[in-house]
Image (cartoon, rainbow, N blue to C red):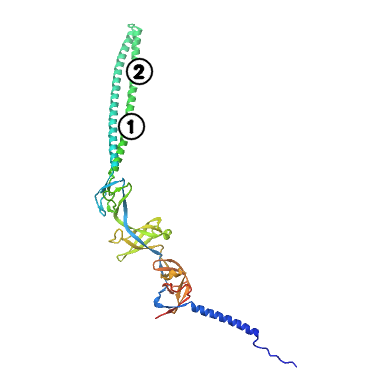
Amino acid sequence: MDRVIQKKKWTTKKIVTISVIAGIVLLIGASYYFTKGGNKLNVETDRITISEVTKGKFQENIPVNGIVLPLTTIYLDAIEGGRVEEKYVDDGTMMKKDQPILRLSNTDLELDLVNQETNVYNLLTQMQISRNAAQQNTVQNLNQMTDVQSQLKEAERIYNLDKDLYEKKAIGSQEYQKAVNDYNYYKQKEKLTQQILGQDSLTNKQQLAQAQQSYQGSQNALAVMRQKVGDLIVRAPVDGQLTSLDAEVGQSKNKGERLGQIDVMGGFKVRVDVDEHYLSRIYTGLRGTFNFADSDYVLEIKKVYTQVANGRFQVDMEFVGKVPRGIRRGQTLQILLALSDERTALLLPKGGFFQQTGGNWIYKVTPDGSKAYKVDIQLGNQNTDYYEVLSGLNAGDKVVTSSYENYGNDMQELVLKGK
């Protein structure tokens, strides 16, 4: 008779399988527990800064410093080198055009002037001698012409008389032929004398023109030399204020050396230093603002100097509209230079968090304010107050914007504790 065998509920295989599954679950749970607990940090809320993401007007700008300069500056360079003999005015004097500033001496130039004057006087004397000689030669030729004409008249008279007598057989052919020859001779001599007189007149005109041209050239050279000597007295080229005068009595100044400058007091501009990083984004027409005596003023870029020195380049800005009263040359202005037009964007207040995160992530506060957890974000442009948020946050979100220096990059959650 068969006996019923009861099936065991807990076989060895089932027990092993359940044990393995339970071990895995326990391991995962423990891993989560210990990992979660290790990435939490308790933080006092009064030790951090919590800011709210807002939506509003955004304009990218950078802070720059500018120095107030006159709108027009004319530099004074030594046109001719020399020794400073006398100063007529001091630095800072208001000058009138052509007013003398200082006097230089240059013995080489002064000697050259004397030599040039002597050359002009010698040339003038030679011209007078040549002119006198030409006049005397012309008088001689005219006298010779008069004699020839007189002799021709006499020969013509004798020829006409002998011709009549010869036709009447009163004289012989030999005497008649002599009268013909004398008449023809003086006719040719008169013609030749006229040619000589005409050639002499033409030669005299050419020599006179050449002499006058040479004399005029010498006069021009003398005028230039006198101007060079006159330039030893440095004068103000325009009305304005003399600044940066660098000359003392007894100093030697080389030709072309900077002596000072004249600031035309017709307005001001601002010379601004900008980091070379922004060179491709700076152009004429960009505007900036600054505050002076509790009022805001606008500047506009008029000129960009693209030469880079020590990692910076310069631009000139001029005032748009009103100019601050009481502003002075040399003052330093703190300017916000706008790099873009105003637009609507998500705004994240600037803070110390950026130094540790590079703007790639931030701690976002939960709605109840009890925790802040790490979220990835993407930031765009910035200005002095805000970052432009491109993704990862929404308007109304609250985030921790103070420094993360003590948190570590692997900290996933902050537990916010109030006092």
Q: Residue at x 34, y 17 (%)?
A: 187
- Location of residue 21 by image quarter: bottom right
- Location of residue 351 by image quarter: bottom left
Q: Locate the N terminus and report the quarter of the image it occupies.
A: bottom right
Which of the pair 269/306 is nearer the observer? 306
Q: Residue at x 34, y 18 (%)?
A: 189
Q: Earlier in the sequence, mark 1 or mark 2?
A: 2
Q: Is 274 displayed left or right of 329 in the figure?
A: right
Is the C-beta separation of discs 1 and 2 under 8 Å? no
Q: How crowded is mark 1: few (under 14 residues within 10 Å), some or many (20 or more)?
A: few
* Residue 345 seen anywhere in this rendered image of the structure: no
Q: Position of residue 316 (x, y in %)?
A: 36, 57
- Location of residue 4 by image quarter: bottom right
Foreground disc of the pair 1, 2: 1
| Label annotation for residue 188 | 2
Q: Position of residue 44 (x, y in %)?
A: 41, 78
Inter-mark Cα distance, 1 to 2:
33 Å
> Which amino acid does the dot numbered 2 rest on?
Gln
Q: Locate the C terminus and report the quarter of the image it occupies.
A: bottom left
Q: Which residue is drawn at 49% across and 78% down?
A: 38
* Residue 229 seen anywhere in this rendered image of the structure: yes
> Which amino acid does the dot numbered 1 rest on?
Gln
Q: In this view, does 154 lie above or below 135?
A: above
Which of the pair 196/62 is nearer the observer? 62
Q: Which residue is drawn at 31% across and 53% down?
A: 73
Q: Where is residue 265 in the image (x, y as percent from the top left)?
A: 28, 55
| Label annotation for residue 210 | 1
